[in-house]
Image (tube, grey):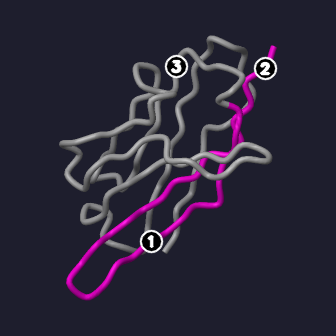
Amino acid sequence: VLLVETGGGLVQPGGSLRLSCEASGFIFRSYAMNWYRQAPGKERELVAAITSTGTSTNYADSVKGRFTISRDNVKSTVYLQMNSLKPEDTAVYYCNARGRFAVGDYDYWGQGTQVTVSS
């Protein structure tokens, strides 16, 4: 199983970034996908979530109206479009795949990508 995040970097306040997470090694379309982030000295927090079919999404209050999660089940990729970025969005962003099945629950994580919002 592999989750590879790309798209992080340094951006000025008010700018945009698009994170991608390409998955392999499991049946991507059967898993809900999430983006978490962890800032220095803080706990990891859920930023955005999308169901396996992509029909439902959910966002942390702090990013509502600014971030958009989407997925492409053909490409086995989940995206996080981040607009109007603020310095408080600075964190390592992690991609997470979560599946709940009759045989058990499965949870996979990427290695993370750094997002820094600074002038």
* Label 3 – label 2 distance at C-alpha: 14 Å
What's the magenta region?
90-119
Q: In percent of the image, x 24 and y 78: which residue is there?
A: 101
Q: Which residue is mark 1?
A: 107
Instruction: Check disc 2 and give the amino acid type.
Output: Ser
Asked whether, in this view, residue 8 is left or right of residue 97, the answer is right
Q: Main secondary structure of the magenta part?
A: strand
Asked whether, in this view, residue 74 is left or right of residue 10, the answer is left
Instruction: Check disc 3 and give the amino acid type.
Output: Asn
Which corner quadrant of the image does residue 10 belong to? Answer: top right
Q: Earlier in the sequence, mark 1 or mark 3?
A: 3
Q: In percent of the image, x 34 and y 78: which residue is there?
A: 105
* Label 2 – label 1 distance at C-alpha: 32 Å
Across and down, in percent, residue 86 comes to 65, 19
Across and down, in percent, residue 97 comes to 42, 62
Residue 97 painted magenta: yes
Q: Earlier in the sequence, mark 2 or mark 1?
A: 1
Q: Secondary structure at mark 2?
A: loop
Across and down, in percent, residue 114 comes to 71, 42
User: Residue 118's mark?
Assistant: 2
Q: In percent of the image, x 40 and y 47: which residue is there?
A: 78
Looking at the image, do the residues carrying marks 2 and 1 touch, with CB atoms under 8 Å apart?
Answer: no
Asked whether, in this view, residue 35 is left or right of residue 51, the answer is right
Which corner quadrant of the image does residue 55 belong to? Answer: top left
Q: In percent of the image, x 44 and y 71: which residue is there?
A: 107
Q: Which residue is mark 3?
A: 83
